[in-house]
Amino acid sequence: MNISTLEWQENQIRESGCYCMRSMQKAPGYIQKLNWTEQELSRGLTYIQLRKDNKSVGFVEYTPGEQAWRAVHADGYLVIHCLWAGVTGAGIGSQLIQRCIEDAVKLGKKGVAVVTNSDTSWAPSPDVFLKNGFQLADKAPHSFQLYTYKLDPTFVDPYFPDNWTQRLERFAQGLTILRTRQCPYLEIATQNVIEAAELLGIQPQIILMDNRPQLMELSPTPYGVFHVIFNGELISYHRLTPRSFAKKLKLLYSKT
């Protein structure tokens, strides 16, 4: 693919649509994502799509660290929420990362940070960031890592909170869903948990985190935007099928 022929579209999510879940534009989660994104644009969020022949081939979403919807302390940095390339081997991911770095320079930021995870596709993999000069800054349970591209090596690294166990202990009783509207798939993910819980006669508590301070206080992993907790134990931080949730939940429920 010829990168030079791609069209860059910045902050046009209402006109161009969301990259994720774009085949289900009438779904509640998709509509929530559009509204959430437009709200966050006023707080510094950037949403960029690369398109070819009027089709999206990749996107990146990032925001100032002070407003990031990830559980990370990254004041002065831009934080990448999501990075997707629909075509592999064409350098699309690197192009989007470099655009973010360029914005960090223009805005006078310390650099760029990203929460990665090699165990799931629901957070970016570190590989493409390592190729673009990022370095490991911190680690957290469940294979989460924090990578940074610092514009000056003397800048202080961003870092994760260190009280993950205590956060889980807040939800020591029952089934709790912590969620936001940042990802269009989270509505489906929430409904899948509810469906699984009904099979066991369990009524989940759903907490909608609608601001960063709340997320920074409650999130039990760096991912921030979605978690399912049962009796103080993390079941998942990403979407699963109702059957998968039911299997995990039944195993934990049998121990009570």
Image (cartoon, rainbow, N blue to C red):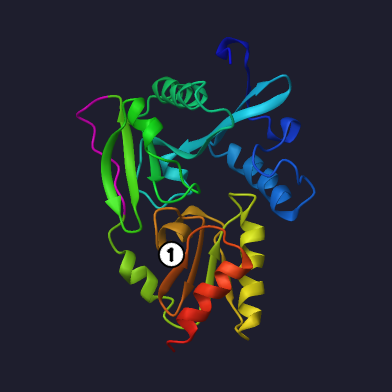
Is residue 39 visible to the viewer in this orientation of the structure? Answer: yes
Residue 40: where, in percent of width, then height? 59, 42
**220 within the magenta span:** no
Residue 45 appears in which quarter of the rendering? top right
User: Eyeballing the image, is 242 above or below 152?
Assistant: below
According to the picture, the residue beneath numbered tag 1 turns out to be: 218
The kind of residue tagged 1 is Leu
Tell me where the magenta segment starts and ends, as one range: 152-160
User: Eyeballing the image, is 120 above or below 239?
Assistant: above
Residue 234 appears in which quarter of the rendering? bottom left
**153 within the magenta span:** yes
Residue 130 appears in which quarter of the rendering? top left
Rendered residue at 46%/46% (across/down): 123
Is residue 110 visible to the viewer in this orientation of the structure? Answer: no
Q: Dot 1 lies on which element?
A: helix
Predominant SS along the magenta part = loop
Rendered residue at 37%/49% (across/down): 72
Dot 1 alpha-carbon crowd within 10 angstroms: few under 14, some 14 to 19, many 20 or more: many
Residue 149: where, in percent of width, then height? 32, 30
Is 45 on the left or on the right of 106, as rendered? right
Rendered residue at 76%/52% (across/down): 27
